[in-house]
Image (cartoon, grey):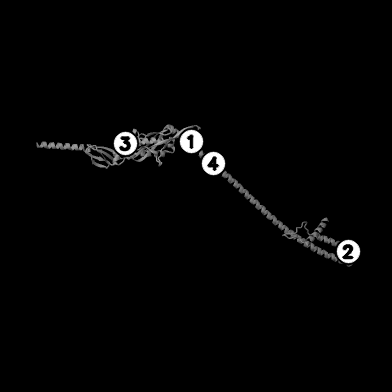
Amino acid sequence: MGNFLKNKIAIMIVVLVVLLVTLSNQIIGKNDAGFYQVKQSAIAGKMSVINTPGMFLRWFAKLTTYQISDIQYFSKSSLDGGKRDSTNPIEVRFNDGGTAKVSGSLRYKLSLKPEDQLKIHEEYRADDVIKDSLIRQIITEALLQTSTLMKAEEVYSTRRSEFTAIAEAQIKEGIYDTYTEEYVKTNVEGNKFLEKIVKIKKDANNQPVIRKESAFKRYGIEIIQFTIKEIDFDPTIDALISKKKEAEQQKVVAKAAAEKAKQDAITSMEQGKAMIAKAKAAKEVEKIKAVTRAKQEKEVAELNATKLLAVAKLNKAAAAEDAEALLIKKDAEAKANKLLVQAGLTPLEKATIEKETKIRVAEELAKVKVPNIVINGGNGTGAGPLDALGIKMLMDINKELLKK
């Protein structure tokens, strides 16, 4: 009897241990870092949040685990988590009718406030549901709404960063309210067409009007990083963009060629101006040289003329002195002969003396070099009466000698 009781107790202890081991995870719970758990009690159904990492008493309560920070992919690449319905690229349509598949990712962080955690748990009940039915849907709606504001060509060329910024703002704040403006435009063929442009409504503070509040704002979800990695346009848009790209390249080449031609024309013009200036300078140099030569020749001529004038004056003075000396000499001889005649010369002797006297006078005068041209004065002075008388006598004698 004693052994039986002991065996029964041992069996009960083993069963209890096995039961405790089996049910331990229902009694004690564990929360890992980077996660939080929503605990719903087994009896009352009351819900609470376990935010701190470590062990806690579960007491058969239902637990739902959520990852605090996670990343949602929307990509065609398996390296970016693609190849699943919930991670495929998101297809959008732009306001010019063009379509594209947008690939990227969104890293987000759930709220750490218990009230936000319980609210999102009540509506979505699971972490995977939050990613697929909440996060992806919000990204999709924001991308679709943003694409209506732009043309595919604009997003490709100049508005890619603006597209990303507006999409991220709508994920965070909510979907913007919009309105449409219509413009009549003329194409390159001269045909008119109606263009519709979708714009964002603004409030009195020039802030976008929110038509639908974002679940991110409602549940306190924080955007850590939003990235658009690729926008894969449809073949029609790709062909249009390719043609425009080629046209832009041709435009750049043409502009460069025109600029080069312009610069070449400017260079030629400047070279022509330089050649003209060089030719003018050369002519100026020749002109200066010619003027200098003429001036020098003039000065030489004036110097020569001055020298000739001085020589002429000297010749004139010498001739006048010679003539005067000869006249004095001959006058003395004539007076001597006259005295001889008065002293009683015969008529024959008188005639002979007069003849010889004239001959000698003529011979002596012939030896005197008398200039044919006489220059009087100089240095601002005139000739005197004596000079004029002497010149007259010399010129008369010279004429008589020339007749002979």
Report the mark closest to the observer, 1 or 3: 3
Q: Which residue is mark 2?
A: 350
Q: Secondary structure at mark 3?
A: helix
Determine the CA span between mark 2 and mark 4. 113 Å
Determine the CA span between mark 4 and mark 1. 22 Å
Determine the CA span between mark 3 and mark 4. 64 Å
Task: For residue 79, say whether it is visible.
Answer: no
Q: Earlier in the sequence, mark 2 or mark 3?
A: 3
Assess whether mark 1 and mark 4 are in contact (beta carbons under 8 angstroms): no
Please tell me the numbered disc located at residue 207. none
Determine the CA span between mark 2 and mark 3. 174 Å
Mark 3 is on which residue type?
Answer: Ile
Image height of 125 relative to 359, above or below? above
Assess whether mark 2 and mark 1 are in contact (beta carbons under 8 angstroms): no
Query: Quadrant of the image for the C terminus?
Result: bottom right
Choose between 320 and 85: the one closer to the eye. 85
Mark 4 is on which residue type?
Answer: Lys
Q: Earlier in the sequence, mark 2 or mark 4?
A: 4
Q: Earlier in the sequence, mark 1 or mark 3?
A: 3
Mark 1 is on which residue type?
Answer: Ala
Location of residue 141 in the rendering, given as x and y in whole percent from the top left corner? 37, 35
Location of residue 145 in the rendering, given as x and y in whole percent from the top left corner? 39, 35
Q: Secondary structure at mark 2?
A: helix
Mark 2 is on which residue type?
Answer: Lys
Q: Which residue is mark 1?
A: 247
Q: Secondary structure at mark 1?
A: helix
Q: Which residue is mark 4?
A: 262
Residue farthest along the bottom direction in this orientation: 343
Q: Which residue is mark 3?
A: 130
